[in-house]
Image (spheres, coloured by chain):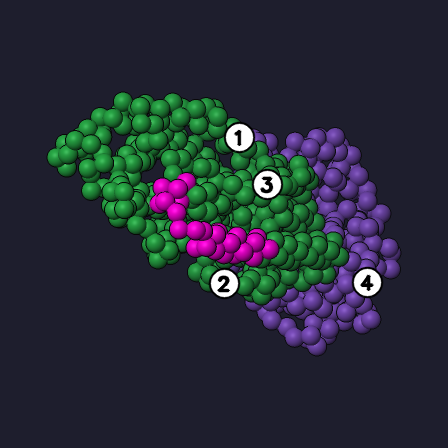
Chain colours: A green, B purple
Amino acid sequence: MLGVLVRNEWRGMLRDGRGVVLIALTLLLGIGAAWASASSHARAERAHARATEAARTAWNERKVDNPHARAHFGDFVFRPSGPASHLDAGVQAVTGRVVYTEAHRQNAAVHRAQRGASALLRFSRLEPSMVLQHLAPLVLVLLGFATVASERESGRLRLHWVQGTSMGSLLLAKSLALWSVGVGLALVVLGVHVSLAEAIDLGRTGAFFALHAGALWIVAVTVVGVSAGVRSSGAAAALLLALWVLSAIVLPRLAVMVASAAEPLPDRDAFAAAMAEDRKKGLDGHNPQDERAKALERKILAEYGVDTPEELPVILFGLLAQADEEYGARVWDEHFGALQAQLRTQADIVGTFSVVNPLQATDRLSMAIAGTGLESHVDFLRKTEAYRRTLIRTLNEGLAYDVKRADDGTLKPAATAEFYAGFEAFDYVPLSLEEQLRRRWLDLLALLGWMLGSTAALLMVARRLQRRGLT
Amino acid sequence: MIELDSVVMEFSGRRVVDELSLKVDAGAVYGLLGPNGAGKSTTINLVTGLLAPTSGTIRVGGIDAVAEPQRARGQLAYVSESVALYPHLSGVENLQLFSTLAGKSLDAPACRASLERAGLQRDAHARRVATYSKGMRQKVGLAIALAKDARAIVLDEPSSGLDPSAAAELTDRIRELADDGLAVLMATHDLFRARESCDSIGLLVGGVLQAQWAANELDDRALESAYLERVGRDADRTASSRDEA
């Protein structure tokens, strides 16, 4: 019975000119979104590859200099966007993917796509996730709001009743038919993605499909349930459009507003000023008059059993610079840790909205699967900072310990071109899909709950219809 | 057969069907007459299982429609005042769909034969139902009912809105259904058509079965007089009770 009813729904959609036009337009938009996203992604990746190569060349071809000078010269690190990121750009557009790493300071990420975007584009990126999370639900609402209500209004529901059609099968068939439109759209979008992408992450692509298939099932079931639960198709349309506006537009913004109000973040300047203030309280490796530097110098001289820096078998400045660096690292850990805790609190507040809004859970999971969410960005910053610390420590220690005596008896750095060539470029290893999903367990649970709950609610509506709810 | 015994239906404490008892034997056509709000449609809804009676028993093909509604529905076909079909499907496709749902799969030739038997002209079989007149949809409705192999059929105002020739054709079809051994219960306003096609006629006013006649007991004029005599007295009350319902 289910197959017969599903086929009938498909036939109805395909023979309805409005339905065909709507589906065709949405497919075109989906294909366009996948193509646009893939091509901009490819451009960005080519630019990043060129920039990475240029940075490495600049590092390798620089004259052999003082390792601390090299620490100030620094290095650019680039975050690869990942093959799934053009399914959902996530927060990458605002967080940036390039960090200039250097001694003494932790720079913010740059190269933010949205800086160059027009105001119009700022909030309307056309990408697969937007099509599947915002447009597809709207299409399902427009295609399905009257699916049961019109059966009731026309009297066909009575005919179904008398012919012995199970109301559960009828509603399930309508949900499956509607869902298949969404799933078809997702398959087309992902097909374009797979055919255009230079590299494919099958695991993430599959997870992205499964996520959206699940979310669209919730939408389809809700559309059919509402259509069956209200008296007229007009009421169903009004209610479903209101639900769409609420879940796609209002609640996500409300969640951000609530999170910002409950846990306000320091603005960028205040954060930088607080860091600078704390940094001033520590040792300044570049200032010989700095009291903390003098104390450390005395301690080092005592450790080596000498009276003057010139008698040391190491270059004192290298050790002071590293001590300066380590103090700066502690300051960064403290401030960034506090900021990260605030971000986590904000994310948790936003996450609670996922419980009531499956589209938000889908959005967060989509970013996690694509590796473009806030968690990924924080992970990138942490790994970038770890790389920076290793780089600067190696250079400072190279300056301090890799030394040779000059003819005048003073110590000089012995760094060679091979020493610098031995530094490996930053190679960002993103969080694994499993790790990303593990961190988003609440969203996964919420979505699963919505899938089961909405299906159960649909079956309850069907049961009510079965118990003479047609009149 | 269809049998109602002391059936009562109340909506919010208001009785819209009051101790209704009637019996339609296999091969017989029973016409349920009455003004608007008399309780005819409620009675039809009770027989088809769309409503459960407050009290009383309803049997279709010998099956208790209250205790076993699903089995009872299996014995019953239904043709509404305005047969609602899928407009995007042809007559054949509608018949195929609804007969499959009733557990009787028909292939296209069988559907065409069934539609022809119901009186639908051949050139309309493959056309979408959206282009059909009301009379043509009634014929598809009858074909759906026939295809179900039901033992009883309920028709709700079947001739309403039909032109005289279509109504006359429908009368013939209804008689054919009865001749095939079905019990036919028909709610109608149409006194003339009721007398012509029915074996028995019941007059429902204010939910109460006021009178029952064998159709051959009365001529048209006598039926009209009997109708007006009873309905005139209760028309206001019945209309208001329908509104309440």
Q: Which residue is mark 4?
A: B169
Q: CA distance from mark 1 to mark 4?
A: 64 Å
Q: Which residue is mark 2?
A: A200
Of tags 4 and 2, which is closer to the observer?
2
Counting residues from the start of the chain, the first of labels 2 and 1 encountered is: 2
Element class at badge 2:
loop
Q: Which residue is mark 1?
A: A254
Q: Residue furthest front?
A: A408
Q: Main secondary structure of the magenta part?
A: helix
Q: Nearer the viewer, residue A348 or B204?
A: A348
User: In x, y percent, where is residue A145?
Assistant: 64, 46
Q: Residue furthest right?
A: B164
Amino acid at pointer 4: Glu
Amino acid at pointer 2: Ile
Q: CA distance from mark 3 to mark 1?
A: 22 Å
Of tags 1 and 4, which is closer to the observer?
1
Is residue A186 among what the camera can see? Answer: no
Answer yes or no: do the residues labelled 3 and 2 have beta carbons within 8 Å? no
Amino acid at pointer 1: Leu
Q: Which residue is mark 3?
A: A114
Residue at image coords 45%, 57%: A204
Q: Residues within 10 Å of mark 1 (few under 14, many from 20)?
A: some
Of tags 4 and 3, which is closer to the observer?
3
Q: CA distance from mark 3 to mark 2?
A: 25 Å
Marked residue chain, label 3? A
Magenta segment = A43-72
On whether disc 3 and disc 1 are found on a single subunit, the reply is: yes
Q: Residues within 10 Å of mark 2 (few under 14, many from 20)?
A: some
Q: Residues within 10 Å of mark 4 (few under 14, many from 20)?
A: some
Answer yes or no: do the residues labelled 1 and 4 have beta carbons within 8 Å? no
Res A340 → quadrant: top left
